[in-house]
Image (spheres, helix red, strand yellow):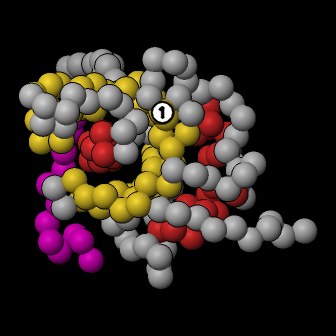
Amino acid sequence: MPPSPFWIQIEDWHTAGEPFRIVEKLPDGSLPESSTVAQRHLDIIADLRHALDQLRQSLCHEPRGHSDTYCGFITPPDDAGGAFGALFWHKDWFYTACGHGIIALGYRAVAKGLVKVPESGTAKIDVVIDVPSGRVVASMNIVDGKPTNADFINVASYQFSKSIPVYLRKVFKSEWI
């Protein structure tokens, strides 16, 4: 039996010209019941016919999207330390993080009142977001209750190896054909 029709509401945000589409409310029953954002991500990509992958394609491909559409599904956080979670995707597949998406989500959290900000003066507010690669923080600079600029702190990364020799072969144009 085909799934029931539903309405989906999206918001398009832009970070320095980079588009980011946000889906806050997902169709009932479509989000895996896993306890972490990382596991939800794995559950979705393990099922090539998952309802959220079909929704991803519907929102990213023409006529509703375009080749540069990046998006995020809002999910519950991993625990009470996160404001919310996000699953990232674009026209090709699901991703573990998105830098301009984190900034857009931080701005949206302030605009929607998901985090408390002082109405006057300056402040730095951290919006904690759980994503498939871990916990990230959108650090929002606030002036008189409005965000003025933002940056983010990504998950820790480590050097896996070093001093690995790389050998390159010079390729001439005649070899390209």
Left or right, 37 with reference to 134: right
Residue 99 visible in the displayed image:
no
Residue 80 visible in the displayed image:
yes
Q: Quadrant of the C terminus?
A: bottom left
Front-most of residues 136 and 156: 136
Measured as percent of width and height from the top left, residue 60 is found at: 47, 68
Q: Is residue 65 above or below residue 147?
A: below
Q: Is residue 116 above or below residue 81?
A: below
Measured as percent of width and height from the top left, residue 87 is found at: 50, 43
Residue depicted at 51% across the width and 44% down the height: 74
Which SS class for mark 1?
A: strand
Label 1 amino acid?
Answer: Phe
Write down the region rendered in magenta.
Answer: 165-177
**What residue is pinned by disc 1?**
84
Q: Is residue 166 magenta?
A: yes
Front-most of residues 44 and 26: 26
Corner quadrant of residue 150:
top left
Residue depicted at 79% across the width and 68% down the height: 4
Q: Main secondary structure of the magenta part?
A: loop
Measured as percent of width and height from the top left, residue 22 is found at: 43, 54
Residue depicted at 51% across the width and 50% down the height: 24
Q: Is residue 137 magenta?
A: no
Q: Quadrant of the N terminus?
A: bottom right
Please identify the residue farthest to the right as the structure is shown.
1
Measured as percent of width and height from the top left, residue 101 is found at: 33, 47
Corner quadrant of residue 176:
bottom left
